[in-house]
Image: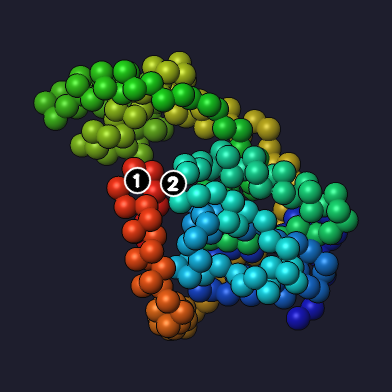
Protein backbone atom coordinates (compact mmCIF):
# COMPACT_ATOMS: atom_id res chain seq x y z
CA UNK A 1 0.00 0.00 0.00
CA UNK A 2 1.37 3.40 -0.99
CA UNK A 3 -0.25 6.71 -0.14
CA UNK A 4 0.96 10.30 -0.06
CA UNK A 5 -1.05 12.67 2.13
CA UNK A 6 0.01 16.10 3.33
CA UNK A 7 1.42 15.92 6.84
CA UNK A 8 -0.88 18.72 7.98
CA UNK A 9 -4.03 16.71 7.32
CA UNK A 10 -5.86 14.54 9.85
CA UNK A 11 -7.03 11.41 8.05
CA UNK A 12 -10.60 10.14 8.45
CA UNK A 13 -11.49 6.57 7.45
CA UNK A 14 -15.18 5.73 7.70
CA UNK A 15 -17.73 3.36 6.22
CA UNK A 16 -20.23 0.62 7.07
CA UNK A 17 -19.71 -2.33 9.40
CA UNK A 18 -17.16 -4.90 8.14
CA UNK A 19 -15.96 -2.65 5.31
CA UNK A 20 -12.34 -2.98 6.43
CA UNK A 21 -11.92 0.39 8.16
CA UNK A 22 -9.94 -0.81 11.16
CA UNK A 23 -7.48 -2.92 9.19
CA UNK A 24 -6.89 -0.16 6.64
CA UNK A 25 -6.32 2.39 9.40
CA UNK A 26 -3.96 -0.01 11.19
CA UNK A 27 -1.86 -0.72 8.10
CA UNK A 28 -1.79 2.95 7.10
CA UNK A 29 -0.78 4.00 10.61
CA UNK A 30 2.23 1.68 10.44
CA UNK A 31 3.26 3.16 7.11
CA UNK A 32 2.97 6.86 7.98
CA UNK A 33 3.83 6.77 11.72
CA UNK A 34 0.33 7.55 12.94
CA UNK A 35 -1.91 6.78 15.89
CA UNK A 36 -5.63 6.04 15.68
CA UNK A 37 -8.60 7.77 17.30
CA UNK A 38 -11.68 5.55 17.28
CA UNK A 39 -15.05 6.99 16.23
CA UNK A 40 -17.22 4.09 17.37
CA UNK A 41 -20.05 4.72 19.83
CA UNK A 42 -19.90 1.19 21.28
CA UNK A 43 -16.15 0.63 21.48
CA UNK A 44 -15.94 3.42 24.05
CA UNK A 45 -17.47 0.99 26.58
CA UNK A 46 -15.36 -1.35 28.66
CA UNK A 47 -16.20 -5.09 28.76
CA UNK A 48 -17.93 -5.01 25.36
CA UNK A 49 -15.12 -6.51 23.34
CA UNK A 50 -16.28 -9.28 21.02
CA UNK A 51 -19.64 -7.77 20.10
CA UNK A 52 -18.07 -4.42 19.18
CA UNK A 53 -15.19 -5.94 17.18
CA UNK A 54 -12.49 -4.14 19.15
CA UNK A 55 -8.87 -4.34 18.12
CA UNK A 56 -6.66 -6.87 19.89
CA UNK A 57 -4.24 -5.97 22.67
CA UNK A 58 -1.41 -6.91 20.30
CA UNK A 59 -2.61 -4.43 17.68
CA UNK A 60 -2.92 -1.71 20.31
CA UNK A 61 0.63 -2.41 21.46
CA UNK A 62 1.85 -1.85 17.90
CA UNK A 63 -0.30 1.19 17.09
CA UNK A 64 -1.79 3.19 19.95
CA UNK A 65 -5.57 3.60 19.76
CA UNK A 66 -7.57 6.27 21.58
CA UNK A 67 -11.25 6.50 22.56
CA UNK A 68 -11.61 2.77 23.25
CA UNK A 69 -12.52 1.31 26.68
CA UNK A 70 -12.87 4.75 28.24
CA UNK A 71 -16.16 4.42 30.19
CA UNK A 72 -18.23 1.83 32.05
CA UNK A 73 -21.34 0.25 30.47
CA UNK A 74 -23.46 2.17 33.00
CA UNK A 75 -22.08 5.58 32.02
CA UNK A 76 -23.82 8.04 29.75
CA UNK A 77 -21.74 9.56 26.98
CA UNK A 78 -22.80 12.25 24.53
CA UNK A 79 -21.64 13.36 21.10
CA UNK A 80 -20.55 16.62 22.73
CA UNK A 81 -18.31 14.74 25.16
CA UNK A 82 -16.88 12.62 22.35
CA UNK A 83 -16.05 15.72 20.33
CA UNK A 84 -14.23 17.23 23.30
CA UNK A 85 -12.31 14.06 24.19
CA UNK A 86 -11.43 13.15 20.60
CA UNK A 87 -10.20 16.69 19.91
CA UNK A 88 -7.89 16.46 22.92
CA UNK A 89 -6.66 13.06 21.69
CA UNK A 90 -5.92 14.45 18.21
CA UNK A 91 -3.95 17.34 19.72
CA UNK A 92 -2.02 14.85 21.87
CA UNK A 93 -1.11 12.72 18.85
CA UNK A 94 -0.06 15.69 16.72
CA UNK A 95 1.95 17.19 19.58
CA UNK A 96 3.92 13.93 19.80
CA UNK A 97 5.02 14.41 16.20
CA UNK A 98 2.85 11.63 14.80
CA UNK A 99 -0.01 11.66 12.32
CA UNK A 100 -3.62 11.22 13.46
CA UNK A 101 -6.16 8.87 11.89
CA UNK A 102 -9.86 8.98 12.81
CA UNK A 103 -11.43 5.57 12.20
CA UNK A 104 -15.01 4.47 12.79
CA UNK A 105 -18.57 4.25 11.63
CA UNK A 106 -20.50 6.49 14.03
CA UNK A 107 -21.60 9.32 11.77
CA UNK A 108 -22.51 11.77 14.53
CA UNK A 109 -19.05 11.44 16.07
CA UNK A 110 -17.30 11.99 12.75
CA UNK A 111 -19.53 14.88 11.66
CA UNK A 112 -18.99 16.63 14.99
CA UNK A 113 -15.25 16.67 14.29
CA UNK A 114 -15.44 17.45 10.56
CA UNK A 115 -17.87 20.33 11.10
CA UNK A 116 -16.21 21.60 14.28
CA UNK A 117 -19.57 21.74 16.00
CA UNK A 118 -20.11 23.86 19.09
CA UNK A 119 -22.44 22.04 21.47
CA UNK A 120 -24.82 24.33 23.29
CA UNK A 121 -25.49 23.00 26.75
CA UNK A 122 -29.23 22.79 27.42
CA UNK A 123 -29.72 21.23 30.87
CA UNK A 124 -32.58 18.77 31.23
CA UNK A 125 -35.56 20.42 32.89
CA UNK A 126 -37.62 17.54 34.26
CA UNK A 127 -40.48 19.74 35.43
CA UNK A 128 -40.77 21.38 32.00
CA UNK A 129 -40.57 17.98 30.31
CA UNK A 130 -43.39 16.68 32.49
CA UNK A 131 -45.45 19.80 31.84
CA UNK A 132 -45.08 19.41 28.07
CA UNK A 133 -45.93 15.71 28.29
CA UNK A 134 -49.19 16.64 29.95
CA UNK A 135 -49.96 19.59 27.66
CA UNK A 136 -49.12 18.11 24.25
CA UNK A 137 -51.27 15.10 23.41
CA UNK A 138 -53.01 13.37 20.50
CA UNK A 139 -56.00 15.69 20.71
CA UNK A 140 -54.09 18.97 20.37
CA UNK A 141 -50.87 17.94 18.58
CA UNK A 142 -51.93 19.69 15.35
CA UNK A 143 -52.12 23.03 17.15
CA UNK A 144 -48.61 22.60 18.55
CA UNK A 145 -47.24 21.45 15.21
CA UNK A 146 -48.64 24.59 13.55
CA UNK A 147 -46.67 26.64 16.08
CA UNK A 148 -43.50 24.84 15.00
CA UNK A 149 -44.32 25.70 11.38
CA UNK A 150 -44.45 29.39 12.33
CA UNK A 151 -41.39 29.37 14.60
CA UNK A 152 -39.07 27.13 12.59
CA UNK A 153 -40.30 25.95 9.16
CA UNK A 154 -37.01 24.16 8.42
CA UNK A 155 -37.24 21.99 11.53
CA UNK A 156 -40.96 21.44 10.98
CA UNK A 157 -40.18 19.70 7.68
CA UNK A 158 -38.11 17.14 9.60
CA UNK A 159 -40.77 16.45 12.25
CA UNK A 160 -43.74 14.21 11.58
CA UNK A 161 -46.89 15.97 12.78
CA UNK A 162 -47.90 12.77 14.60
CA UNK A 163 -44.58 12.40 16.44
CA UNK A 164 -45.49 13.58 19.93
CA UNK A 165 -42.02 12.90 21.30
CA UNK A 166 -40.26 15.15 18.79
CA UNK A 167 -42.91 17.88 19.04
CA UNK A 168 -42.48 17.95 22.81
CA UNK A 169 -38.71 17.92 22.44
CA UNK A 170 -38.84 20.91 20.08
CA UNK A 171 -40.68 23.00 22.65
CA UNK A 172 -38.52 21.74 25.50
CA UNK A 173 -35.44 23.05 23.67
CA UNK A 174 -37.15 26.25 22.56
CA UNK A 175 -38.47 27.16 26.01
CA UNK A 176 -35.19 26.24 27.74
CA UNK A 177 -32.80 27.99 25.34
CA UNK A 178 -35.00 30.72 23.82
CA UNK A 179 -33.73 29.48 20.44
CA UNK A 180 -35.28 27.33 17.74
CA UNK A 181 -33.54 24.16 16.60
CA UNK A 182 -32.48 25.87 13.36
CA UNK A 183 -30.96 28.77 15.29
CA UNK A 184 -29.06 26.30 17.48
CA UNK A 185 -27.83 24.39 14.42
CA UNK A 186 -26.60 27.61 12.81
CA UNK A 187 -24.84 28.75 15.96
CA UNK A 188 -23.21 25.35 16.44
CA UNK A 189 -21.44 25.70 13.07
CA UNK A 190 -20.02 29.18 13.60
CA UNK A 191 -16.57 28.01 14.73
CA UNK A 192 -15.64 25.54 12.00
CA UNK A 193 -13.30 22.52 12.27
CA UNK A 194 -10.22 22.54 14.51
CA UNK A 195 -8.13 20.53 12.05
CA UNK A 196 -7.46 20.12 8.35
CA UNK A 197 -9.18 16.83 7.49
CA UNK A 198 -9.03 14.52 4.51
CA UNK A 199 -11.76 11.86 4.47
CA UNK A 200 -12.03 8.42 2.89
CA UNK A 201 -15.32 6.53 2.81
CA UNK A 202 -15.10 2.78 2.20
CA UNK A 203 -17.98 1.45 0.13
CA UNK A 204 -17.54 -2.25 -0.72
CA UNK A 205 -19.82 -3.95 -3.22
CA UNK A 206 -23.00 -4.83 -1.34
CA UNK A 207 -22.87 -8.62 -1.77
CA UNK A 208 -19.25 -8.76 -0.65
CA UNK A 209 -20.11 -6.62 2.35
CA UNK A 210 -22.93 -8.98 3.36
CA UNK A 211 -20.55 -11.93 3.14
CA UNK A 212 -18.04 -10.15 5.37
CA UNK A 213 -20.73 -9.27 7.90
CA UNK A 214 -21.92 -12.88 8.01
CA UNK A 215 -18.36 -14.13 8.44
CA UNK A 216 -17.65 -11.62 11.20
CA UNK A 217 -20.84 -12.62 13.02
CA UNK A 218 -19.86 -16.29 12.83
CA UNK A 219 -16.40 -15.49 14.16
CA UNK A 220 -17.90 -13.52 17.05
CA UNK A 221 -19.94 -16.53 18.14
CA UNK A 222 -16.85 -18.72 17.90
CA UNK A 223 -14.90 -16.22 20.03
CA UNK A 224 -17.51 -16.36 22.81
CA UNK A 225 -20.07 -13.65 22.05
CA UNK A 226 -22.89 -15.46 23.86
CA UNK A 227 -20.86 -15.75 27.06
CA UNK A 228 -19.83 -12.10 26.84
CA UNK A 229 -23.47 -11.01 26.57
CA UNK A 230 -24.57 -13.33 29.37
CA UNK A 231 -21.89 -11.94 31.68
CA UNK A 232 -22.89 -8.37 30.87
CA UNK A 233 -26.56 -9.11 31.47
CA UNK A 234 -25.81 -10.72 34.83
CA UNK A 235 -23.56 -7.89 35.94
CA UNK A 236 -25.70 -4.99 34.76
CA UNK A 237 -29.23 -6.41 34.79
CA UNK A 238 -31.69 -3.83 36.05
CA UNK A 239 -29.27 -0.91 35.90
CA UNK A 240 -31.15 1.86 34.11
CA UNK A 241 -28.31 3.39 32.10
CA UNK A 242 -26.52 0.20 31.06
CA UNK A 243 -26.01 -0.44 27.36
CA UNK A 244 -27.12 -3.62 25.60
CA UNK A 245 -26.20 -5.56 22.48
Q: How crowded is mark 2: few (under 14 residues within 10 Å), some or many (20 or more)?
A: some
- Closer-to-camera residue (33/110): 33
148 versus 21 height, above or below? above
Q: Name the residue under label 2.
A: 74
Q: Mark 1 points at which residue?
A: 239
* Colour scheme: rainbow
Labelled disc at residue 57: none
Residue 80 higher or lower than 172, as above or below: below
Q: Which residue is drawn at 68% across and 32% down?
A: 191
Residue at image coords 76%, 58%: 100
Q: Position of residue 138 (x, y in %)?
A: 14, 30
Circle 2/circle 1 CB separation < 8 Å: yes
Q: In this view, does 197 lie to the left or right of 7?
A: left
* The C terminus sits in image quarter: bottom left
Image position, residue 84 (x, y; %): 64, 40
Residue at x 64%, y 75% (from the top left corner):
23
Please indicate whether residue 37 sits to the left or right of residue 213 in the image. Answer: right
Q: Is mark 2 on a helix, strand or loop?
A: loop
Q: Earlier in the sequence, mark 2 or mark 1?
A: 2
Extreme-right residue of the structure: 97
| Residue 141 spot, x, y in % from top left | 19, 27
CA separation, marks 2 and 1?
Answer: 7 Å
Instruction: Kindly tell me whether residue 82 is visible in this rendering.
Output: yes
Left or right: residue 55 compared with residue 209? right
Q: Label 1's element?
A: loop
Which quarter shows the N terminus?
bottom right
Q: Which residue lies furthest to the left in this view?
A: 139
Residue occupying image coordinates x 29% and y 27%? 168
Amino acid sequence: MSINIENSKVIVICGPTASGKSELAFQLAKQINAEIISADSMQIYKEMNIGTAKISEKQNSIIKHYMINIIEPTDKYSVAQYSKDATLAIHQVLKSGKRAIICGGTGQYINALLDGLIFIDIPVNESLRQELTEKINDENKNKWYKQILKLDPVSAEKINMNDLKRIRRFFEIYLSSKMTQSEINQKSREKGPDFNFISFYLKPERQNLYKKINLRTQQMFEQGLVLEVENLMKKYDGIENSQSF
